[in-house]
Image (spheres, rainbow, N blue to C red):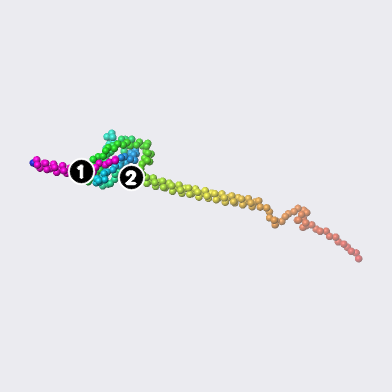
Amino acid sequence: MTPLFLHVILIVCGGHILYAGANRPAAPVNVSITHLRADSANVSWNIVDVDVVIGYAISQQRQDGLAQRFISEVNTTSRACVLWNLDEDTDYIIQVQSIGLHGESQASKKIHFRTLEKSDHFQSSLMDQDDPAVEGLDMTRQLQTGEMVIVMTVLIMWAAVIGLFCKQYDIIKDNDSNNHSKEKAKPPSEHSTPEYHNGGLLGSKFQRTSSSISIIKV
């Protein structure tokens, strides 16, 4: 193989490498960690608009070097990813790469974060509502809240109906009691026949009038 031929091959290969490198996307920027929990976290990033990006690659590892994971996804325009199955109260390091038509970009700057302890689980209520990882969970909570509101409304309506019924029943009962008392206290009728003792009206009916008989002699 002549030196001239080797020189041509090197030029062609070098030009191809330079062309491929020039068409790779730039490294992601503004990498950040949000929605931090004891066993998960959400990583998001931005890309340069002029770059053609068809996916992403994430390098995740514990700071002590005991565990490392690679996450790669293509044919997506997503700029966020949920990191699952993390260890609580543990330091992690992540880097993100963009995947283009001609290869992967350089890795982004290293991002350090520490997961929460399980006792801090309730701090997750401060998470953003736009988090895709908890969108389904938030929807379930909204449905449960709506169902509880409906149940409470029905119970309140039933309690109001029962209270109104008891009140009406007491009023009817009081009216019946008052009418019964009035009937007992009613005076005797004016057309009733009075009764008298001897010498009265009844006695006078049975008194006999005396008559005298005169005899005339002829």
Q: What secondary structure is the stretch in magenta mostly built from?
A: helix
Label for residue 22? 1
Residue lying farthest bottom? Answer: 218
Height in image: 107 above or below 208?
above
Which residue is found at the position 25% from the left and 46% from the top? 50
Residue lying farthest left? Answer: 2
**In front here: 147 or 134?**
134
x and y percentages locating residue 105 in the rendered image: 23, 42
Q: Is any atom of residue 64 visible in this view?
A: yes
Label for residue 97? none
Neighbour tally class for label 2: few under 14, some 14-19, many 20 plus, Cα within 10 Å: some
Instruction: Return the disc, 1 or 2, that comes first in the chain's sequence.
Output: 1
Q: Amino acid at mark 2?
A: Pro
- Image-based side of 204 in relation to 157, left or right: right
x and y percentages locating residue 74 in the rendered image: 25, 45
* Stretch of the chain drawn in magenta: 3-31
**In front here: 90 or 109?**
109
- For label 1, the SS is helix
Which residue is found at the position 28% from the left and 43% from the top? 46
Q: Is any atom of residue 59 visible in this view?
A: no
Residue on which the image places disc 2 = 132
Which residue is found at the position 52% from the left and 50% from the top? 164
Assess whether residue 97 is covered by the magenta stretch.
Answer: no
Q: Where does the C terminus fall, quadrant-wise? A: bottom right
x and y percentages locating residue 85 in the rendered image: 31, 39
Q: What is the spatial separation of the Cα atoms under label 1 and label 2, in whole angstroms?
A: 34 Å
Q: Amino acid at mark 1?
A: Ala
- Image-based side of 98 in relation to 158, left or right: left
